[in-house]
Image: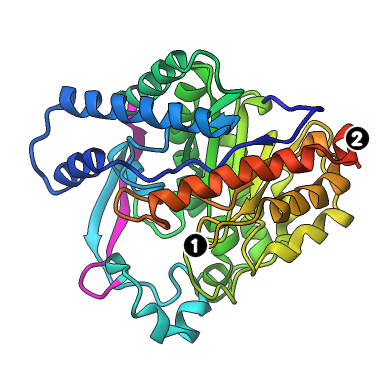
Amino acid sequence: MKRSTERFLTTHVGSLIRPPEVVELTAAKTSGQAIDDDALTSTLGVAVADVVKRQAQTGIDVISDGEFGKLGWYTYIYDRLEGYERRPAEPPRLGPGGEDRVRFSDYYSTMPMPQLQRGNYRQEVCVGPIKYIGQKDMQRDVDNFVSALRAANHAVEDAFLPVIAPASISSDHRNEYYKSEEEYLFALAEALREEYEIIVNAGLLLQIDDSILANGRDYVIEVLGQDYRTWVELYVEATNHALKGIPEDKVRYHLCWGSWPGPHTSDGRLDEIIDLVLKINAQGLSIEAANPRHEWEWVVWQDTKLPEGKILIPGVVSHAASHVEHPELIAQRLKRFGDLVGAANVIASTDCGFAQSFRTTRQHPSIQWAKLEALVEGARLASRQPAMASSRVR
């Protein structure tokens, strides 16, 4: 991963709002309509080229393909793994949001989350050996992105593709094949490594997305009846198993709390698990840090040393609130992190993605781009401050 001692670099978490033509084709494919693969690849290629160009023009240094080739940040994997069967099931009492969803049931009943409504909920059940079968789709996404980057003519510092972490695919699934949950988890990690390697072998950075590690606290304690930190330790071990053989400096790890708009009063605390998260073999640590529930957690870095070589990628712009952050606020947030871990060890980012699926958008496109423009300007302001001259690690 690239870093700079001259200025704060900028990035985001990965997903950007898909253009209408991509949404239309993806919706048709998911509804079971016959879609010409060449037409889909071509449409995605044009859309990815456009979004790469737009990111470069905006001034984002480390960019993604917008996740245009995926159904959603985790649902895409359903088509890329063999060994699962999808069945109707009862929605979990403590699904995404944990006790929050119970305490604020009146609020959550108004949210457009039909997949969690009674009668609509489906659960993935492991009924056979897990095998990765998504090579063609993954290679298509890689090829489209690499082609777009070449057309950008080195206008970006670095580029990454986001994919799912083991914890975020396995936690709400049921295992009926493997002898234990641990055996199931490591079989899943082994299969996911093949996807990870395709990305890294193409010369791109790999980002693994994980909302369940932090967001699953209530579920682990109250439903599974397990010790939360012990559970996290196992998933960190599985994540590292999936990353076996992949250079640490080619990996970013994204941690958030589900990140949908909502109260989030039952979210776990970063200081509960930060020591375990730092054991993940990823150089970059992308952590939600701008929303009102978690912004205070910058104080974690007063007592936690960022290991040498690691890069902190804090969210300093919210994807969920429609307010466009003032560049001065962004600069203040960046300076805070820079003062604690060394400015050269910080890359400015958003909290999470702007479109977790092709149907789920957190903002209007104009607000998305305004926020990214503010991110770039805030990073420029922060870069003019004396802290940028330091490349120390506390």
Q: Is residue 132 magenta?
A: yes
Judging by the rendered image, the residue that carries numbered circle 1 is: 322
Depth order, front residue of 275/149: 149
Depth order, front residue of 22/188: 22
Q: Three-letter amino acid code at disc 1?
A: Ser
Whole-percent x, y for residue 111 in the image:
35, 73
Q: Residues within 10 Å of mark 2 (few under 14, many from 20)?
A: some
Q: Residue at x 51, y 48 (%)?
A: 370
Q: Three-letter amino acid code at disc 2?
A: Arg
How far apart are the alpha carbons under marks 1 and 2? 35 Å
Magenta part of the protein: which range?
117-135
Q: Residue at x 46, y 49 (%)?
A: 368
Depth order, front residue of 85/294: 294
Q: Residue at x 62, y 51 (%)?
A: 234
Quadrant in which the C terminus appears? top right
Judging by the rendered image, the residue that carries numbered circle 2 is: 392
**What's the colour scheme?**
rainbow
Q: Quadrant of residue 130?
A: top left
Quadrant in which the N terminus appears? top right
Task: Report whether residue 300 is seen.
Answer: yes
Q: Which mark is residue 101?
A: none
Q: Residue at x 34, y 80 (%)?
A: 109
